[in-house]
Amino acid sequence: MKRLFSIEFQKIWMNRSSRILLISYFIILSFIALIASLKIEIGSFNMRLADQGIFNFPYIWHFNTYIAAVLKLFLAIVIVSMMANEYSYGTLKQNLIDGLSKKEFVLSKFYTVVAMALASTVYVFLLSLILGLSFSSYDETSIIFTDLQFIAAYFLKLTAFFSFCLFLGILVKRSAFALGFLLVWNIFEGIVFAILRVGFFADSPDTARSVMRFLPLESMANLIKEPFTRLSLIKQIETSIGGAANAKIYDVQFVDVVIVLAWTVIFVLMSYTILKKRDL
């Protein structure tokens, strides 16, 4: 495992574009801290976001992992480019000639995917911990380490998404086309939901959502649901305009974890199957 990961790390780090993307990703990820200084001023209304509890424990674990997950496209570009370069530079064929099996090749890519997801998860964990200790109104240990399920869900979400990107990179061979396919698939899932919602389950939107949760991107999105409606400010606004109480479940659901794990295994197996059958 160490040997396979070392090979992939050298390939990525020696590539200037990939190195810049990786560094840029972690720099931009740090900008989450700037949210603490943002102020909203509308006439006499003045509000600082950090004062609204977004960095309170344990809410911060939910908020930061949701925001950080939006930036995962940076690492997705690195992954699809990593595969495209294997074909463009002929390193894939050379690795196989040098004795690396196709199974080991796919495993080396998957280890890289897991390492990227883990590095991002550790970074988000440390960043959230520092921000929470700086701004949170609660500093009891039992509260600080509550809801770490979102950190675990973040790691799983990135691993699954990057495995999908790895599969697309192997399938399409060109990074631009692979990213384009990712966009098309995202649109496809949106169309499927519209068809289910309007056509098949017009009277039962919950049924449509239950079907959608089995699709790859939707299942990943369901791991960490939007955190904004948990804020007391939003709840106060909903109450003031006569809105119903929000009964949304924000916790990471076990069924979503199982679905995402299944898709991760499927993507890795499909990557190996394609590579095994392809004439290189």
Image: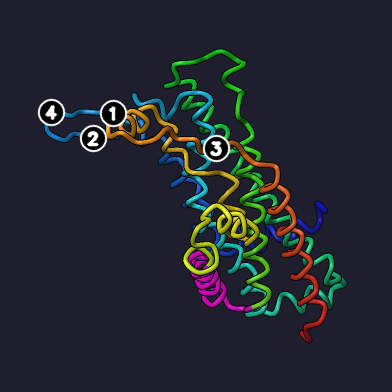
Q: Coloring scheme of the render?
A: rainbow
Q: Earlier in the sequence, mark 2 or mark 3?
A: 2
Residue 187 in the magenta stretch? The answer is yes
Q: Magenta stretch?
A: 172-195
Type of amino acid at the residue the image marks with label 3:
Tyr
Q: Nearer the viewer, mark 1 or mark 3?
A: 3
Give x and y (percent) for residue 81. 58, 69
Residue 238 shown left or right of residue 56 in the figure: left
Secondary element at image label 3 = loop
Q: Nearer the viewer, mark 2 or mark 3?
A: 3
Q: Residue at x 28, y 30 (%)?
A: 240
Alpha-carbon span between mark 1 and mark 2: 6 Å
Q: Nearer the viewer, residue 279 or 201?
A: 201
Task: Give the farthest residue toward the left.
Answer: 43
Q: Nearer the viewer, mark 1 or mark 4?
A: 4
Q: Which residue is mark 3?
A: 250
Alpha-carbon span between mark 4 and mark 2: 10 Å
Secondary element at image label 1 = strand
| Label 4 crowd (10 A; few <14 / some 14-19 / many >=20) | few
Q: Which residue is mark 4?
A: 44
Q: Are marks 4 and 2 in contact (CB under 8 Å)?
A: no
Q: Nearer the viewer, residue 65 or 244?
A: 244
Q: Residue at x 68, y 59 (%)?
A: 10
- The image quarter containing residue 277 is bottom right
Q: Which residue is mark 1?
A: 48
- The image quarter containing residue 172 is bottom right
| Label 1 crowd (10 A; few <14 / some 14-19 / many >=20) | some
Q: Which residue is mark 2?
A: 40
Vertical order, 266 against 223 (above or below): below
Type of amino acid at the residue the image marks with label 4:
Ser
Residue 53 shown left or right of residue 273 in the figure: left
